Amino acid sequence: GSAPIVMQRNPMFSTINADDITKFKEILGEKNVVQDEEVLLAANTDWMQKYKGSSNLLLQPRTTEEVSQILKYCNSRCLAVVPQGGNTGLVGGSVPVFDEVIINMGSMKNIISFDKVSGILVCEAGCILENLVSFLDNQGFVMPLDLGAKGSCQIGGNVSTNAGGLRFVRYGSLHGNVLGLEAVLANGTVLDMLGTLRKDNTGYDLKHLFIGSEGSLGIISKVSILTPPKLSSVNLAFLACKDYVSCQNLLLEAKRKLGNILSAFEFLDSHSMDLVLNHLEGVRNPLPPSMHNFYVLIETTGSDQSYDKEKLEAFLLRYMEVGLISDGVLAQDINQAFSFWRIREGVPEALMKAGAVYKYDLSLPIEKMYDLVEEMRMRLGPAAKVVGYGHLGDGNLHLNISLPEYDDTVLGQVEPFVYEWTSKHRGSISAEHGLGLMKANKIHYSKSTESVHLMVSIKKLLDPNGILNPYKVLPSSLTS
Ligand code: FAD
């Protein structure tokens, strides 16, 4: 199935000719100008296999200077481009819509510096998140973000989408942790904002424009990020709750009682669990089969193993007694912890294997969050599997509708209902995945007309020809 988005190629953009290829080879060398069909097929297709472009050209810059020269040339020729990281984005932002040139950042993967006193890491944008995690682990530090796609996604992609993930509840947003950036503008200008200072109130903080801008304002080439020290004691509990209200109350208590050692609070409903058990090999429910409606993962990270463990055990015991927790188990070792995380992190993969999926990534008031899942289930009836999971600790619901194949009739029942519902509760229609192609025309559900117009002005100022990731993020009717 393909994405149900019908649009026209913007005729302002040129198409690639032989001179362009010669020029790119001059800048990058033969082998970094990729026209191989197999590579292009993969780079034209998104992680969900839902969005497919038809680009004939992928460029692999190795330095900021190369990125700058490519963009300068594309801008002068009015060639549209799509910046691409690990291509794990979930809103169709990282693949071309038509024949945009793909600029893949994977070759810019050097770590530039690490300061062990401040914990500040400076690296190139193409570093894979998991590689940064391993590098830091050896230094006794951790990345302030973690997510299921860590084996492929790149730090530049994470910053460009302002990815949230599993540790957000503890370490907060990339708007806080990213201390500096280097970005290349559409005309090739290199913007050095690669500071490593915690405090710097000199004028407008321009880096924030690029964090979460999904490749629409510039290409991020380097990142400076504050990393917290690795703490020795990590504990993980896998719990069951009988209803959503219990999950919600448990969150409140966890924040209150576990306070500064709480490092993750994730949830999934039994429908998500069924999908994982049915579609992922080697995964099993650590709790005996029962009528559990919800599962919660609580992770603590601190510096005193016996104290932290006792604290979590006492917490579990207490809330089992009062009935907020119906059943639960503490990971006994790192392998068991890994298997618990596999369940939660495996939900997107299981959904993909189950067939077609409509994905909604919403911020909602926590007390209202699951009402939407239930309403959607009633609305769609037994024809669709409606699942809810996500980062409960951050008020972030992943509402997913799983079907054997894409179906416009079902989609018509889901949208715009889901956006209207979210807007009515003053939520966000994109909590952490961005707008991409999927929601470029939906931004008004979460942002005022005045805000959108200012965004359009900023886009036009930084990228007057609109070559950077066209058709994404902002409504095409306003940008072209
Ligand atoms: P891509 O997918 O390649 O690109 C994403 C966007 O950023 C595109 O618009 C692209 O044009 C732009 N971009 C990429 N690199 C650059 C650059 N250097 N400069 C400018 N623009 C660039 N997200 C969360 O927030 N939390 C989660 O918990 C989470 N879990 C996930 C789990 C799975 C299994 C998967 C598949 C995805 C998950 N995601 C999650 C989605 C998330 O947005 C991405 O995984 C990740 O942040 C994207 O990084 P990437 O390198 O793959 O970027």
Image: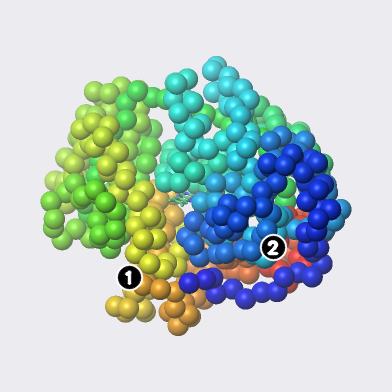
Residue at image point 57% right, 58% down? 41
**18, above or below 104, in the image:** below
Residue at image point 76% right, 69% down? 10
In the image: residue 122, left or right of residue 237:
right
Q: How is the image coloured?
A: rainbow
**343, above or below 352, in the image:** above
328 or 157, which lies in front?
157
Q: Residues within 10 Å of mark 2 (few under 14, many from 20)?
A: many
Q: Secondary structure at mark 1?
A: strand
The residue tagged 2 is 99
Q: Amino acid at mark 1?
A: Lys
Q: Is residue 435 something that shows in the picture?
A: no
Report x, y in % for residue 205: 72, 40
Report x, y in % for residue 357: 42, 67
397 or 191, which lies in front?
191
Q: Is residue 412 something that shows in the picture?
A: yes
The residue tagged 1 is 385
Q: Amino acid at mark 2?
A: Asp
Residue at image point 44% right, 74% down? 406
Residue at image point 31% right, 45% down? 342
**301, above or below 445, in the image:** above
